[in-house]
Amino acid sequence: MFSRHISAVAILLFVAGFGCADAGQGEHTPAPFAPDEVFADAEDMDFDTNGEEEPEPEPEPEPEPEPEPEPEVYYLEAVGDTSLVAPAGTSTSLDVRLVNGDSDPISDEAIRYTVIDSPPGGATQLDASTVLSDDAGEASNNVRVGSVQGAITVRAAHDEVDDPVDFYVDVTTVPPGDMRVLVDYTTTDLMEITDVEIRYWKTSRLQCSLIDPFSTPAEPFIDEDIMGTVNGEVQFQDLEAHETYTVTAVGHGPQDQISAAGCVDDVPIVSNDITNVVVPIELIDLLPMGTYEVTSVWDFTEALKASGPVGSAILDILEWVADPGQAAAGYVVDLAVDWVCDEDNYGPDSDECWAATLFAPAAEDTVADFINEQIDEIGILSDFQTITQDLQKTVEEMTVESLLKINRKMGAEGEVSGLDIWQSVYFYWTQDCDANSPPDCGEIQIDLGSDTEYGFLQSTWDGRIYDYDQLEIYPHSMDFPYGKFITQILNETLIPALTDGEANSLNEAFEYLLCGNIGDIEIWGIVIPESTVQGFCNSAFSALGSALEIYVNSLAYDVDLDISGGGHLIDLESDRWVDVIEDGWFLGEIEGEDGEVAEMDATFTGVRRSND
């Protein structure tokens, strides 16, 4: 510090001396001396030990700014050849790699593919329009070429690449291939399938899920052929190779209806080779729902036998009127034997009584022939015999027309329910009919319904469809007022017509028509006078009167049956809907008063009226 002050003083003296030198040349007023300021300035000066001032240090240069990084440069290069050949209908891979200036791969970058040139109608397709590069920087896309020959140009590009990669694909022809088609049908025991229609399409144009065997697809098939049986085969030639096809098989049943079908997708065709394809076909479920007009024919013979005395009496009378001579002969012969053996005539110990008793059975045939001869001579009696035989036919063949409604039960595969509503019952009086008469000759129709004395006659049942076309009707109950129909026809129509209104019952009719026309009868040389014969006749019919009255008055008997049945369902229009029920049958059981079970049966056919 001391040396610094000495230096400062020296400077001041130097300055002051310099100032004095100047003052000798002119007037000068020295400035007031301010030692504090001088020493203050001296404090800021640096002097070395020799009294010299040290130079000020150079300022440090400011750091230069970081240079802007140059953008990374990407390059797109083909992986493999860019000039490719693709047979028509095939696809080929277009591969590129994205790298930077150091040839490092760039991943997760979008590579765009664009078809920039293609033959008209070539149907060129790319699997994707944009593909992301993978960890190796590579992107791969497929181009599918159509069937048109020519050149295709596909460009691969990236937003940061100036030079895209162009691929040139030359579409060439491919030798075709053939296809052999067979079918696999395993349910031959259920239905014979014939005339199997085989058709095919390109799978790219139509798939199995879009094909209904009962309708024609909008896309036309390429070709078709018919396989006569399910064991045959068909072959199609010159199909485009490396293409896939959809093949269908549709088989027909006995009525030429579509009954079975199958389909296979994605059948490949190999160039210069035969592709074998097996199409499984299955029976198609029928649709039985709807309303059918049904005609049924019922045989109640056994049911009436089991119904007890009433039903048995009905059958006895029907057998009697079918051969009245034989039926009445027994009564007449018994009465004749009693007359001969009576004390007032020949007496019980007479040879005549012995002979009458001995030959009575043989005499029945003679009397039966006689009575039947009398009937033949009386035309109206022949008519009466005809209509009573028609009554017996009604027992065996009663015709019913009904409406059958079938519904499918929800949630139960193949299960159905039915409602059978009877509309009309038919009786046939054929006395004026011959072999050339129409089938409805002599028809008498009895209508049923709410406005009739019979009301509605109907039965409900459950059932199922099985084995494709078989209907099973489960057992169900049915109440049938059979006797009311016969009573109405007999008492209100037939007997009054035959007797000109003189009788309204069977016994009245026979007494009126037969007993009044029989003359003397001679048996074993014994002549029985006409008056006595008439008495025998009236007595015979009187003996039958109780049964006849039962027949007339008790035919209101209701048949209570437990019935099951079935039928054959047929689709005639090839639309799955059942059009006809054929070979229909009912089998019923009735328990008689003695516990004996008897059967009755019926046959029926049904024709679809509507789908409702």
Image (cartoon, rainbow, N blue to C red):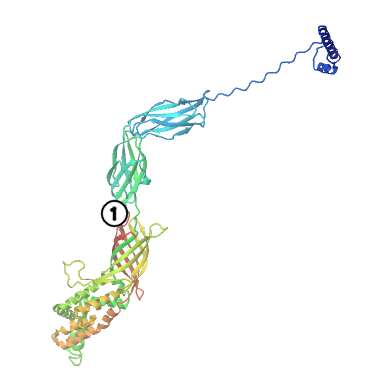
Q: Residue at x 52, y 23 (%)?
A: 101
Q: Going by the picture, which residue comes out furthest to the front?
A: 27
Q: Is residue 358 above or below residue 88?
A: below
- Which percent across, then down, holds residue 36? 85, 18
Q: Going by the picture, which residue comes out furthest to the bottom?
A: 344
* Amino acid of disc 1: Glu
Q: Is residue 205 above or below residue 431?
A: above
Mark 1 lies on a secondary structure that is: loop
Observer able to see residue 508? yes
Q: Which is more toward the observer, 375 or 239?
A: 239
Please indicate whether residue 453 sits to the left or right of residue 336 in the image.
Answer: right
Where residue 2 sits, quadrant-wise, is top right
Q: Is residue 93 above or below residue 387?
A: above
- Which percent across, then down, holds residue 509? 21, 81
Where residue 609 sits, quadrant-wise, is bottom left
Q: Which is more toward the observer, 522 or 224?
A: 224
- Which percent across, then down, holds residue 298? 28, 68
Q: Which residue is mark 1?
A: 573
Observer able to see residue 336? no
- Quadrant placement of the N terminus: top right
